[in-house]
Image (cartoon, rainbow, N blue to C red):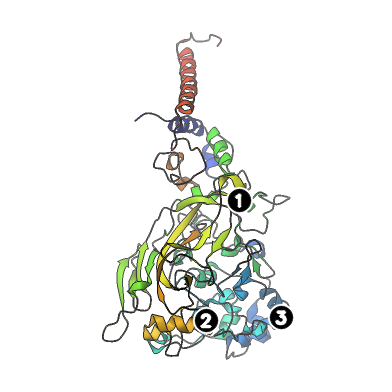
């Protein structure tokens, strides 16, 4: 194999890198592992409490419901209700100022459990409120806010669907132990990873199903799994990065800063944004070698996540990669069933078939897809027209090297065959959850469920449903590995390297130009000869001679 300029550059840069000191390697930006005892989770600027809630008279009473607890909370935290109602955890709605699209779980169709709208009785158990069953939910009533889902520390608080659903599904939530609401209310604290994970780890219908980098493994991870959240490292809570101001969180899938142009705020304090640069700055690698200098040079075109999250779905919890709704609806003796066909790294079994959802494929320790990304996601909404004979991007992204706001980012790709209106060429609202005869999770009649879902919201429906192949893309930004496990130069600078599908750049080691390669080889060879020559002169010169 002929040497390439990329290989020779890596050889020379590596020789310079060996001169760096061990003390530097053990410090910034990746902290060393700590030993027990495990410190409290770090929750950003609000770390540390100032009140003992067991002493509050308002909480020393039996509570019959969650809204009663919320009333007690608001009797002291008088402005919190109005603050909270402005965040997307409450509204499930956001209008993109650049595209004009109306987004959020309240409106979008996804290629997992399809649509939350019309299925709020089930889906809204992950809404930060109480009782959202249908379009009549009162978003202006502060007592509908669920304070406990984010602030419980007992581990005994849970949420069930807001309506019973069909008998076939409601059995899943029977036999739950009663919640001691007074105990939970008196035990509140700043949100921990387990609070956020109650919903975010289980998005899409199960543990790590949707995102691939958010799973139950992050409740108490090692530093090796996530250098920020590791209990033997920094032990960050989610809010350490997703900084909160007036109950509005930094960072959103609908508003991603793919390239941070500002870095750390002044004077040397992080900004209220969820970017790597807001803590680590725009030159995060200590310049103690030529290799480190080049790594900093990469920041302008390569996202930190690209090198520092070599794989996702780590820690023993698999993620879903394919979902086929075409196979849903099979029964045995008239009843639905499920099959466990995948055993993941932590030994747990995952369903590979469910009558109510179809067939699934799982995988772990996955290499991401790498593409240019400017932070802008594009969504196929309920009224978007498309060719039903071609794969449809449910959520896609934009970006290129030329726009100035893009960098090369890692993505998870999700593929799903899902129901659609093939007559009109649109997605559909599928009525899955309900106590009526039309709900699919009860009657297994897809046509009936789609007709009900479209009619409920006054949407045009041709009466012809079929299935379309869909794709969705999920930026990977969690499960950050320690720096010693980050990608090496040759991971990308190779003909079949990780960036083989990235366009718009000349990548040494991957791409070839005869004249450029020749110039590089001559320059590097000349440098090596000069170094060797100097070493020989030193070796054979008489002792004491001036050089």
Look at the image and tell me in which quarter the C terminus lies. Answer: top right
Look at the image and tell me in which quarter the N terminus lies. Answer: top left
Q: How many marks overall?
A: 3
Q: Indicate which disc, 2 or 3, sits on the residue closer to the N terminus.
A: 3
Q: Indicate which disc, 3 or 1, sits on the residue closer to the N terminus.
A: 3
Does 102 appear above or below 540?
below
- Give coordinates of residue 336: x percent, y percent: 32, 82
Q: Nearer the viewer, residue 531 or 42?
A: 531
What separation in Å lies between label 3 and label 1 (alpha carbons)?
A: 40 Å
Q: Secondary structure at mark 2?
A: helix
What separation in Å lies between label 2 and label 1 (alpha carbons)?
A: 35 Å
Find residue 162 and name its label: none
Find residue 76 and name its label: 3
What separation in Å lies between label 2 and label 3 (alpha carbons)?
A: 30 Å
Q: Nearer the viewer, residue 329 or 389?
A: 389
Using a 10 Å C-alpha cutoff, classify the residue at mark 2 as few (fewer than 14 neighbours), some (14 to 19) or many (20 or more): many
- Give coordinates of residue 290: x percent, y percent: 55, 33
Describe residue 517's horizontal placement relative to residue 255 as left or right.
left
Find residue 259 and name its label: 1
In percent of the image, x 66 and y 74: which residue is there?
84
Q: Secondary structure at mark 1?
A: loop
* Residue 377 visible at all: yes
Badges 3 and 1: C-beta atoms under 8 Å apart? no
In percent of the image, x 42 and y 30: which residue is there?
4
Mark whose residue sits in front, 3 or 1: 1
Q: Indicate which disc, 2 or 1, sits on the residue closer to the N terminus.
A: 2
Q: Which residue is mark 2?
A: 120
Q: Secondary structure at mark 3?
A: helix
In percent of the image, x 62 and y 75: which residue is there?
91
- Give coordinates of residue 121: x percent, y percent: 51, 84
């Amino acid at each position: 194999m002929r040497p390439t300029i990329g290989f020779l550059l890596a050889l020379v840069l590596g020789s310079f890198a060996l001169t760096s000191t061990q003390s530097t390697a053990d410090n910034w930006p990746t902290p060393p592992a700590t030993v027990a005892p495990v410190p409290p989770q770090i929750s950003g600027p609000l770390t540390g409490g100032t009140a003992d809630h067991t002493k509050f008279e308002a909480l020393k009473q039996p509570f019959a419901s969650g809204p009663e607890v919320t009333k007690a909370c608001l009797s002291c935290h008088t402005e919190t209700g109005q603050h909270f109602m402005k965040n997307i955890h409450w509204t499930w709605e956001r209008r993109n100022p650049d595209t004009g699209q109306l987004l959020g779980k309240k409106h979008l169709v996804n290629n997992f459990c399809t649509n939350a709208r019309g299925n709020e009785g089930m889906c809204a158990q992950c809404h930060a409120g109480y009782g959202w069953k249908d379009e009549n939910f009162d978003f202006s009533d502060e007592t509908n806010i669920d304070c406990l889902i984010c602030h419980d520390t007992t581990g005994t608080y849970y949420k069930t669907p807001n309506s019973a659903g069909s008998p076939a599904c409601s059995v899943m939530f029977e036999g739950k132990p009663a919640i001691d609401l007074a105990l939970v209310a008196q035990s509140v604290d700043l949100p921990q990873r387990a609070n956020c994970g109650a919903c975010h780890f289980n998005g899409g219908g199960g543990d790590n199903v949707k995102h691939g980098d958010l799973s139950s493994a992050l409740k108490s991870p090692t530093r090796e799994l996530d250098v920020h959240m590791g209990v033997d490292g920094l032990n960050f809570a989610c809010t350490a990065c997703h900084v909160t101001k007036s109950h509005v969180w930094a960072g959103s899938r609908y508003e991603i800063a793919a390239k941070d142009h500002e870095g750390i705020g002044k004077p040397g304090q992080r900004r209220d944004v969820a970017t790597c640069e807001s803590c680590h700055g725009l030159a995060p690698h200590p310049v103690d070698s030529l290799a480190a200098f080049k790594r900093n040079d990469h920041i302008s075109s390569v996202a930190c996540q690209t090198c520092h999250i070599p794989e996702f779905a780590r820690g023993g919890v698999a993620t879903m990669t394919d979902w086929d709704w075409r196979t849903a609806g099979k029964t045995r003796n008239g009843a639905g069933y499920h099959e466990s066909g995948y055993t993941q790294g932590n030994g747990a079994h995952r369903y590979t078939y469910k009558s109510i959802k179809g067939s699934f494929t799982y995988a772990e320790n996955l290499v991401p897809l790498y593409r240019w990304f400017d932070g802008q996601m594009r969504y196929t909404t309920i009224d978007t027209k498309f060719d039903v004979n071609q794969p449809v991007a449910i959520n896609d992204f934009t970006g290129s090297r030329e726009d100035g706001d893009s960098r090369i980012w890692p993505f998870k790709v999700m593929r799903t065959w899902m129901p659609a209106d093939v007559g009109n060429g649109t997605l559909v609202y599928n009525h899955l959850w309900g106590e009526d005869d039309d709900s699919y999770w009860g009657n297994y009649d897809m046509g009936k469920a789609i007709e009900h879902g479209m009619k409920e919201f006054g949407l045009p429906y041709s009466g012809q449903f079929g299935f379309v192949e869909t794709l969705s893309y999920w930026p990977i930004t969690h499960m950050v590995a320690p720096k010693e496990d980050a990608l090496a130069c040759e991971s990308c600078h190779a003909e079949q390297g990780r960036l083989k599908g990235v366009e718009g750049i000349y990548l040494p080691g991957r791409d070839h130009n005869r004249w450029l390669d020749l110039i590089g080889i001559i320059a590097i060879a000349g440098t090596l000869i000069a170094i060797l020559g100097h070493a020989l002169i030193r070796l054979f010169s008489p002792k004491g001679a001036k050089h």
